[in-house]
Image: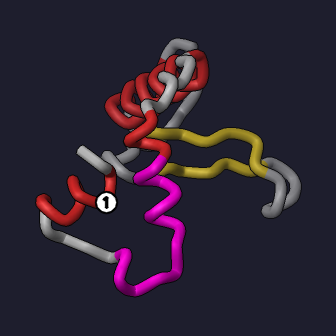
Amino acid sequence: MKSDEVRAPAVPRGRAVIVTRYREDVAKVALVNPHDLAMLEESHDLLRSLAELQPLPLCAAALKALRLEDRADDSARVESAGRIAELLGL
């Protein structure tokens, strides 16, 4: 739509202006900054692409790490690389 066909305020980055028509609780239009719109479109495209990815199969060590991580046992909580390798049999 050409700017001379509508009077819209400038919208600063990070903000949106919600336009209603008859009832305040029903949004008619949301005005956003062009940079924000480009960011939203890019985010939408990235999320759509992520949804199309197939997960990689987990190796035995990864499956074992996930099982160990889910245990409520306090002794299973380790931060030492050597202890982690020992637990995973690496």
Q: Quadrant of the N terminus?
A: top right
Q: Position of residue 80 (x, y in %)?
A: 13, 68
* Magenta span includes 66: yes
Q: Quadrant of the C terminus?
A: top left
Work out whether residue 5 can be spotted: no
Please rate how many residues cluster around mark 1, counting C-alpha atoms within 10 Å: few if below 14, some from 14 to 19, many from 20: some
Work out whether residue 70 can be spotted: yes
So how many labels did they put on this image? 1
**Is disc 1 placed on a helix, strand or loop?**
helix
Residue at left offset 80%, top offset 48%:
21
Q: Residue furthest right?
A: 22
**The quarter of the displayed image where residue 78 is located:** bottom left
The vertical placement of 30 against 34, above or below, is below
Q: Position of residue 66 (x, y in %)?
A: 48, 54
Residue at left offset 45%, top offset 64%:
69
The vertical placement of 47 against 77, above or below, is above
Residue interval drawn in magenta: 64-76
Residue 22 or 36: which is nearer the viewer?
36
* Secondary structure mostly taken by the magenta-highlighted segment of the chain: helix
The vertical placement of 14 against 84, above or below, is above
Q: Which residue is mark 1?
A: 87
Residue at left offset 38%, top offset 41%:
61
Q: Position of residue 81 (x, y in %)?
A: 13, 59
**The quarter of the displayed image where residue 51 is located:** top right
Q: Position of residue 47 (x, y in %)?
A: 52, 28
Residue 86 or 14: which is nearer the viewer?
86
- The three-letter code of the residue at mark 1 reads Leu
